[in-house]
């Protein structure tokens, strides 16, 4: 009898290649002061959210939705949450999903039609890229934050005789760079050409009046679609697409990740309603986060003037090489700070970085100590 083939060799070999490039990922336990989560307002462990979940359980809200939204999975609480979110964000209609990844995928694979052009900022999240790839529109990428380039690409596309709708997809606050999209200029371009899709994942809860996001002033326009996630500043999990009613109805009818999936846990709807209430009732959380941002950016500018900062709660410290980045991250972790190195393919090759994320899970003293530690370790590279 022939020796059985080593069925796992193909996987082992690829993992060994990743290790050779200093790109092998492992699951590590939580350790150190939080400078890596997206729990910007410190809500994930908040007693108010825990109480909301407890009250829902006591009121016999089921833990699981037990079906697709189009079947038995459409519980009242989910619809109440969507109605509340529509009021809060100023949208005509809202549709909930189990997470931001699947919501982004659903949106960009479903709404842009055959014959349309989908233009993505080159730094858009993996979920936007995967949605674009699965959809029917032609996809092009414009240089990061460069509206002129987006306009030029549209110009060439139109000159080739295309008459379809243009969809421009961006993040309001970029997840790995912490910078802000030129939303007003993009909205102007979208007014002339089609639709603007804004992923507010890292801005929701943090920016805009009451944390309604950086695109809050554009919400409610018929050609603006926004995505708000619940798993970052809002402390839960899930996501909401905010859009004009016909677009939401189209997603309900045509979006496969919506139709062929179990609805999110109704408990998350209870948590989401409470998270929106916290955004209204506890503005001091945003003020404290802003104080962290101001302190960290000022300390970095003073201690490491050669390092560019972002001015937001996401501060990328670009190191360059993968191995150097992970080595520096390990040294900082050894001092008790949970700072992670980010490597390709999450970020472009040659731009590996420490992604410092400021949250209310760290104190002002922690922020100061991290800046001191960075000053001490940075030149050692
Ligand atoms: C910009 C952006 N969009 C979408 C997502 C996905 O959201 P979720 O984590 O809720 O799936 C992320 C998560 O990292 C993100 O950074």
Image: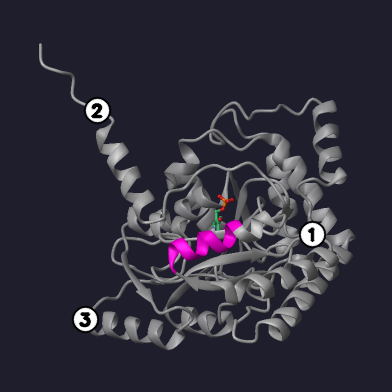
- How would you rate the neighbour count of disc 3 (Cα within 10 Å): few for under 14, some for 14-19, many for 20 or more? few
Whether tag 2 and tag 1 are in contact, CB under 8 A, the answer is no
Residue at 73%, 50% in the rendered image: 235
Nearer to the camera, 294 or 300: 300
Q: Quadrant of residue 216?
A: bottom right
Residue at 68%, 63% in the rendered image: 204
Nearer to the camera, 358 or 149: 358
The scheme the figure's colours follow is one colour
Q: Quadrant of residue 370?
A: bottom right
Nearest to N terminus: mark 2 or mark 1: 2
Check disc 1 and report the residue beneath it.
362
Q: Position of residue 238 (x, y in %)?
A: 62, 46
Check disc 3 and report the residue beneath it.
160
- Give the Cα separation between the discs numbered 3 and 2: 48 Å
Residue at 72%, 51% in the rendered image: 32
- How would you rate the neighbour count of disc 2 (Cα within 10 Å): few for under 14, some for 14-19, many for 20 or more? few
Determine the residue located farthest toward the left in the rendered image: 1
- Magenta stretch in the rendered image: 321-330
Where, quadrant-wise, is the N terminus in this rendering?
Answer: top left
Check disc 2 and report the residue beneath it.
7
């Amino acid at each position: 009898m022939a020796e059985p083939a080593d069925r796992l060799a193909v996987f082992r070999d690829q993992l060994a290649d990743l290790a050779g490039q200093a790109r092998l990922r492992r699951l590590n336990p939580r350790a150190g002061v939080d400078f890596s989560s997206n729990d910007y307002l410190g809500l994930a462990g908040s007693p108010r959210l825990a109480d909301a979940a407890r009250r829902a359980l006591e009121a016999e809200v089921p833990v699981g939705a037990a079906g697709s939204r189009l079947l038995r999975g459409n519980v009242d609480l989910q619809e109440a949450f969507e109605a509340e979110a529509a009021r809060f964000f100023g949208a005509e209609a809202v549709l909930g999903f189990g997470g931001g990844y699947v919501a982004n995928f659903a949106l960009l694979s479903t709404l842009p039609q055959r014959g349309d052009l989908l233009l993505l900022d080159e730094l858009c999240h993996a979920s936007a890229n995967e949605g674009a790839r699965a959809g029917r529109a032609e996809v092009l990428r414009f240089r990061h934050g460069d509206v002129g380039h987006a306009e030029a690409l549209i110009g060439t596309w139109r000159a080739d005789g295309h008459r379809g709708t243009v969809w421009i997809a961006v993040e309001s606050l970029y997840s790995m760079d912490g910078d802000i999209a030129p939303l007003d200029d993009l909205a102007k371009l979208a007014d002339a050409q089609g639709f603007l899709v804004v992923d507010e994942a890292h801005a929701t809860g943090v920016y805009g009046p009451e944390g309604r996001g950086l695109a809050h002033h554009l919400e409610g326009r018929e050609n603006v679609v926004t995505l708000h996630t619940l798993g970052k500043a809002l402390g839960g999990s899930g996501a909401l697409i905010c859009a004009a009613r016909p677009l939401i109805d189209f997603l309900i009818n045509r979006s496969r990740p919506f139709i062929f999936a179990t609805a999110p846990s109704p408990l998350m709807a209870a948590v989401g309603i409470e998270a929106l209430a916290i955004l209204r009732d506890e503005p001091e959380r945003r003020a404290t986060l802003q104080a962290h941002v101001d302190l960290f950016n000022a300390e970095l500018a003073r201690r490491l003037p050669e390092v560019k900062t972002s001015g937001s709660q996401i501060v990328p410290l670009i190191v360059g090489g993968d191995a150097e980045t992970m080595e520096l991250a390990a040294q900082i972790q050894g001092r008790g700070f949970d700072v992670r190195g980010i490597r390709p393919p999450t970020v472009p090759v040659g731009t590996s970085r420490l992604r410092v994320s400021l949250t209310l899970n760290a104190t002002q003293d922690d922020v100061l100590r991290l800046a001191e530690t960075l000053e001490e370790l940075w030149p050692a590279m």
